[in-house]
Image (cartoon, grey):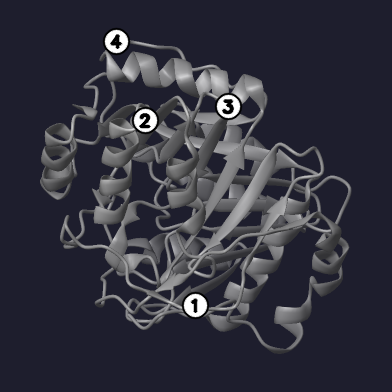
Amino acid sequence: MDAATGDRASGPRGTKRATIALLSAALVLLTACSTPSTPPSRAPSASPAPTAAAASGSPTSTSTPTPTATAAAGGYDTLVVEPDQGMGAFYQAIGGAQRSLDLVMYELEDSTAVNDLIQAEKRGVAVRVILDQAYAKSQNQAAYAALLAGGVAVHWSSTQVDITHQKTLTVDSGEALIMTGNLTAQYYSSTRDFMVADKDPRDVAAIDAVFDADFSKTGVQPSSGDDLVWSPGSEPALAALIQGARKELLVENEEMSDQDIVAALEAAAQRGVDVEVCMTDSSSWSSEFTALTHAGVKVFTYAANASLYIHAKVIVADPGTAAVRAFVGSENFSSTSLDRNRELGIVLSGSAIDAQLASVLDGDIGGATAWSGS
């Protein structure tokens, strides 16, 4: 795929939330990140799908304008938008750790991240890593071996859940980076993903507790903290977020097969909510797209070979209103992801992040094509 250089919208759709974004400007934090070079073409994945990225590959950086990371009004959360802002914030988090780093990752094929974790261990940071073995073990094998040789405590995922699809880095038990994307370097420059830096103490403590259980391969009942949505069992929370929308729903996801989520989106459209779904097109979801459009949902898609691949898992309910709520996480809309995998997401209410998410999704929709059947 060709690298995506920013939001793809132009005209009315792209400017729909410009006013909201400007109101958030006072909360902007500047970061110095870079956008990786163009990766090879990728095909849409199954549920979930392995990739063909080399485990030793690392991103190549080119100079880009300084991006922005938007902080929530409460000061707890910061949003990073991919591919626009690069992976600098993630690498900086590893480099800034003083005491501990806990990484849970479905796919780790980024030699920069692997080397940074090893260097952190060597400077005295206690580094622990969990990598999925149920579906992505072959992709993770090289990273696993390198981390083990570098002295990092790396474990294969727990069999207490089907697949470990969670994507989280916890730094010094004080901040958790909750991501929609994998650490797969060849796709960084072309894949729509998001990362939320969560500093809520109750959230971070809950994430630490689940990590400890999964690292030791023991059972655990995850706490939701203040804002968290865990799988197994995330479907009711996501359906409730959809059901609570009154005016508008913006949705991005990689998959669309869970019938309860599809039904919730259909019901929202039928009660008069403006529902817009943006995804990368795949014949795997044709029947669901047909049902959604018949119910009044507006489905927009990118071709599988487009320069932007929609990998994010995001819901924004009632953007631009006092009741706005947004979800960002690892959960795909499949029964496997929602009911059986280890997944993690976060719900944000009334923060500047909600406005930025809505702006990015509006831009993506503006660059997509209205779905009319595969």
Q: Secondary structure at mark 1?
A: loop
Mark 3, residues whose alpha carbon is within 10 Å: few (<14), some, or many (≥20)? some
- Asked whether residue 322 is in view, the answer is yes
215 or 98: nearer the eye? 98
- Quarter of the image for residue 335 reads top left
Looking at the image, tell me whether mark 3 or mark 4 is earlier in sequence order.
3
Q: Is residue 227 left or right of residue 56?
A: right
Task: Tell me how far mark 2 sits from mark 4, CA to CA.
Answer: 13 Å
Amino acid type of the residue that numbered disc 3 sits on in the rendered structure = Gly
The residue under label 2 is 342
Residue 29: percent from left, percent from top: 71, 56
Q: Nearer the viewer, mark 3 or mark 1?
A: 3
Looking at the image, tell me whether mark 3 or mark 1 is earlier in sequence order.
3
Residue 255: percent from left, percent from top: 40, 55
Name which residue lies at 11% across and 35% down: 149
Q: Nearer the viewer, mark 2 or mark 4?
A: 4
Above or below for 339 versus 367: above
Residue 90: percent from left, percent from top: 46, 50
Picture mark count: 4
Above or below for 220 versus 240: above
Specify the quadrant that holds the C terminus: bottom left
Looking at the image, tell me whether mark 4 or mark 1 is earlier in sequence order.
4
Q: Secondary structure at mark 2?
A: loop
Q: Is residue 42 left or right of residue 97?
A: left
Task: Tell me how far mark 3 sits from mark 2, CA to CA.
Answer: 22 Å
Mark 2, residues whose alpha carbon is within 10 Å: few (<14), some, or many (≥20)? many
Task: Tell me how far mark 3 sits from mark 1, CA to CA.
Answer: 43 Å
The residue under label 4 is 218
Q: Residue 371 got which mark?
A: 1
Mark 1, residues whose alpha carbon is within 10 Å: few (<14), some, or many (≥20)? some
Amino acid type of the residue that numbered disc 4 sits on in the rendered structure = Thr
